[in-house]
Image (spheres, rainbow, N blue to C red):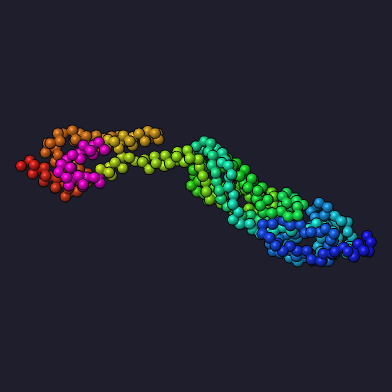
Amino acid sequence: MSIGSFIKKQFIDILQWTEDSDGVLAWRYPMEDMEIQYGGSLTVRESQMAVFVNEGKIADVFGPGMHKLTTQTLPVLTYLKNWDKLFESPFKSDVYFFSTRLQIGRKWGTAQPITIRDADFGMVRLRAFGLYSYKIADAARFYTEISGTRAEYTRDEVEEQLRNLLIATMTSTLGGASVPFLDMAANQALMSQTIRDKLAPEFERYGVALDNFAVTNVSLPEELQKAIDTRISMGMMGDMAKYTQYQVATSIPLAAQNEGGVAGLGASLAAGAVMGQAMAGGLGAAAGVQPAAPAAAAAVPAAAAAPADDPAARLQKLKDLLDKSLISQADFDTAKAEILKKLVG
């Protein structure tokens, strides 16, 4: 090297990265026509790591702090360059800085529906969306597996790869889970934790630590949503007999206020009870449950079989309803008075 070229050569005393822009995860210090001064300082901030690379091979890795660059602080680089202990000349080496800040609020989603096998519905196609956060935990591995020798590597570039990894892991996790999808969809926290546990080791392979993962929305096909709505409706109507009894009981006080209302209610009560038993029996048969014996319902039609204009029969019906607490004493007295009034003229 001539004296002129040596004078023109620039020497670096301080190596540092100020992270002027957001979204850059890896940045290579510009070293063209420059050499690092022996004994110079390397400043690595709390949210950074620095990696020295010699001829394509990773040498020394530095965490946060101010480091004086000597053969003692660069043991691997000293070995790779075959320096002796008295080496004090400027040297060249590629230096990469990595941002280890937590990248929060990153969005993920399934661009296309994914197909999974479910214990309840067979093959299910769904779309899901959510948020996750991560950070670079192993700079050397991230350099080897992801960023490489680029001058800079951005957050958008790495997230394109992470999302593909996320979707693949999510599909295999949900498809192989023994928990039915409906149970997991009802508890998105459980779904999030299940997927996160599978994702964390996959992220770690690339030097990335998965800090948080959340499923915020699961979208089902319309036909599956209708099937779920039908199942919910069937569950809500499970005890039709009790529902029918409730309707009849609430209508008796109103019927007692009308002439002949309570007397005519006997046939309606019988029909309602039979209908409730029939519907409950049909739902029970669909679920594999034997219907209850219709003994209680059969007693009402027997009473209703008497002529509707027989005062004694009407009074007996009223007494039966009173004994079963289906009407109040006041309702019974009112209806009884009407029947006796008609009987005596």
Q: Quadrant of the C terminus?
A: top left
Percent coordinates x, y for residue 176 in the rendering = 57, 40
Q: For residue 88, which quarter of the picture?
A: bottom right
Question: Is any atom of residue 211 visible in this view?
Answer: no
Along the line of sight, which residue is nearer the eye, 200 or 42?
Answer: 42
Residue at horizontal 48%, vertical 40%? Answer: 222
Compared across the picture, whether 54 is left or right of 341 comes to right
Left or right of 266, for residue 311: left
Frontmost residue, 261 versus 198: 261
Q: Is residue 259 left or right of residue 178?
A: left
At 69% from the left edge and 49% from the top edge, which residue is drawn? Answer: 205
- Asked if one can make out residue 225 in the rendered structure from this viewpoint, the answer is yes
In the image, residue 254 above or below residue 136: above
| Most common SS among magenta residues | helix
Q: Residue furthest left?
A: 345
Q: Residue at x 85, y 55 (%)?
A: 80
In the image, is residue 333 above or below residue 272? below
Relative height, residue 298 to residue 220 (above, below): above
Please give left or right for residue 284 compared with residue 49 in the image.
Answer: left
Q: Is residue 79 magenta?
A: no
Which residue appears at 93% of the width and 60% of the height?
A: 1
User: Residue 307, percent across and down?
Assistant: 14, 34
In this view, the residue farthest toward the right is 2
Give the image location of residue 156, x and y in percent: 66, 52
Region of the chain picked out in magenta, as a range = 249-272
Q: How many marks?
A: 0
Image-quadrant location for residue 296: top left
Q: Position of residue 277 (x, y in %)?
A: 30, 36
